[in-house]
């Protein structure tokens, strides 16, 4: 669903992704969220991930029989068999009528901001979708909430902001797409992931009697071409330990949120290799002395204009990786973030874990590993395949 939020004047907002950026390098966070508010290069190789999320959203928003749900208020109507039927005016089911079989791959399904995935990536997305449905990585279970907003106070002056891909009263799911399966988090690291633990805090806030929350990554990998369900339960104590660190980070960032001095005075990387993670920090040129802030802004504006032009050309094939002369396979989505010793110590160990893999083989036959028993009520309609 479209994301919208009314931000309060004078309030600071911290998301789990912001937290992870600041944990890696305060200066990188300050460049993007401090007074400078430097733009990030457009795209950054995330188009495949955006398309995957949209596919998952349409599948999961459909009802248990695979049909289009009721659209938001203010929708259009169409006459079908002489009856006025609500039609989605915008959003994931744009142009689709309530009650019709949901079209998971509508026109322009593989477009992001005017850019179209190439044929290879489009085929990968469809193949992985079929594997995800057949292998139980995508499941329509009762009680699911899709793109659930998460917000609330952290400390005075700071509020949490974020969205959960799939939420249940006692479980959180996040869709992760990546170039290589080696970037998928292990169950042990998943149990220490800031984003998931922070979102789990919202569940135990809603239910004071909830002592165990299941965290789950739905992994979509290009190499090898497979989907994988990685899940692990975490305790209330683990969730609260993570929340204490989240609050501590908000207190620390209060000083830097309004710091308007020279960037050299802002603390740099806190871990080895931080500058090269995720295809490389976009601000490396500034820190190395090769650019000043004004030159960086000009460069990003030029990249944005070039992408807008390329989106209008027949091939529509240029990406952030092309413009920066990077190997697109190094620009992965959902890659793992180093978690520091302090976090590991506080969050502690985890209960038993589960990894389930579904790999497309021989035109779609799957080989699940350690798959849990099927849940009653899950329906994968024939039209979805």
Image (cartoon, helix red, strand yellow):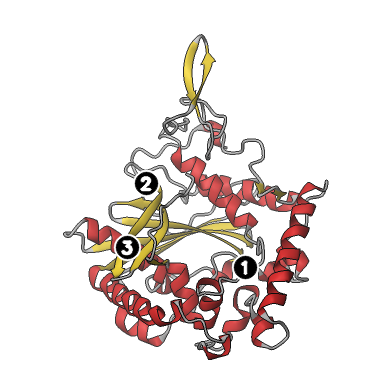
First along the sequence among labels 2 and 3: 2
Residue 47 image point, x, y percent = 64, 56
Q: Nearer the viewer, residue 139 or 9?
A: 9
Label 3 sits on a secondary structure element that is helix
User: For the residue carrying disc 2, how many other residues have a C-alpha within 10 Å: few (<14), some (14-19), or many (20+)?
Assistant: some
In this picture, residue 220 sits left or right of residue 247: right
Q: Residue under label 1, please give it.
A: 40
User: For the residue carrying disc 1, how many other residues have a C-alpha within 10 Å: few (<14), some (14-19), or many (20+)?
Assistant: some
Label 1 sits on a secondary structure element that is loop
Label 2 vs label 1, nearer the camera = 1
Q: Between marks 1 and 3, how big is the CA–CA gap?
A: 29 Å
- Find residue 145 and name its label: 2
At a point 51% along the width and 47% down the height, the residue shown is 56
Which quarter of the rendering shows the C terminus? top right
Instruction: Identify whether 182 is placed above or below 316.
Output: below
Residue 201 image point, x, y percent = 29, 64
Q: Between marks 2 and 1, how big is the CA–CA gap?
A: 30 Å
At a point 75% along the width and 70% down the height, the residue shown is 324
- Find residue 200 and name its label: 3
In this picture, residue 138 sits left or right of residue 238: right
């Amino acid at each position: 669903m479209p994301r919208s939020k009314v931000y309060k004047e004078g309030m600071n907002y911290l998301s789990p992704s912001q937290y992870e950026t600041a944990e890696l390098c305060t200066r990188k966070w300050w460049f993007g969220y401090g007074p400078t508010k430097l733009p990030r290069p457009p795209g950054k190789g995330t188009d495949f991930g955006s398309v995957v999320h949209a596919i998952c959203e349409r599948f999961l928003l459909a009802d248990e029989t695979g049909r289009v749900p009721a659209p938001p208020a203010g929708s259009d109507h169409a006459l079908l068999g002489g009856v006025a039927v609500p039609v989605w005016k915008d959003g994931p089911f744009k142009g689709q009528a309530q009650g019709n079989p949901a079209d998971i791959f509508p026109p322009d399904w593989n477009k992001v901001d005017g850019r179209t995935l190439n044929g290879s990536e489009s085929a990968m997305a469809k193949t992985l979708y079929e594997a995800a449905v057949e292998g139980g990585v995508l499941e329509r279970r009762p009680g699911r909430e899709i793109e659930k907003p998460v917000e609330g106070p952290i400390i005075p002056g700071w509020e949490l902001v974020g969205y959960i891909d799939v939420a249940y009263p006692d479980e959180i799911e996040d869709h992760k797409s990546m170039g290589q399966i080696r970037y998928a988090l292990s169950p042990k690291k998943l149990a220490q992931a800031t984003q998931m633990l922070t979102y789990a805090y919202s569940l135990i806030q809603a239910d004071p009697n909830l002592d165990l929350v299941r965290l789950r990554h739905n992994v979509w990998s290009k190499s090898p071409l497979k989907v994988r369900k990685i899940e692990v339960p975490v305790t209330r104590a683990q969730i609260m330990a993570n929340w204490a660190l989240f609050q501590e980070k908000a207190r620390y960032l209060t000083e830097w949120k309004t710091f308007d001095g020279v960037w050299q005075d802002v603390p740099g990387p806190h871990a080895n290799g931080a500058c090269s993670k995720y295809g490389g920090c976009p601000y490396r040129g500034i820190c190395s002395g090769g650019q000043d802030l004004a030159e960086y802004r000009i460069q990003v504006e030029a990249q944005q204009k070039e992408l807008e032009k390329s989106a209008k050309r027949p091939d529509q094939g240029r990406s952030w990786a092309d413009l920066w002369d990077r190997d697109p396979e190094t620009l992965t989505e959902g890659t793992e973030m180093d978690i520091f010793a302090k976090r590991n110590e506080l969050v502690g160990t985890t209960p038993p874990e589960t990894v389930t893999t579904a790999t497309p083989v021989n035109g779609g036959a799957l080989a699940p590993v350690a798959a849990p028993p099927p849940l009653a009520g899950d329906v994968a309609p024939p039209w979805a395949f």
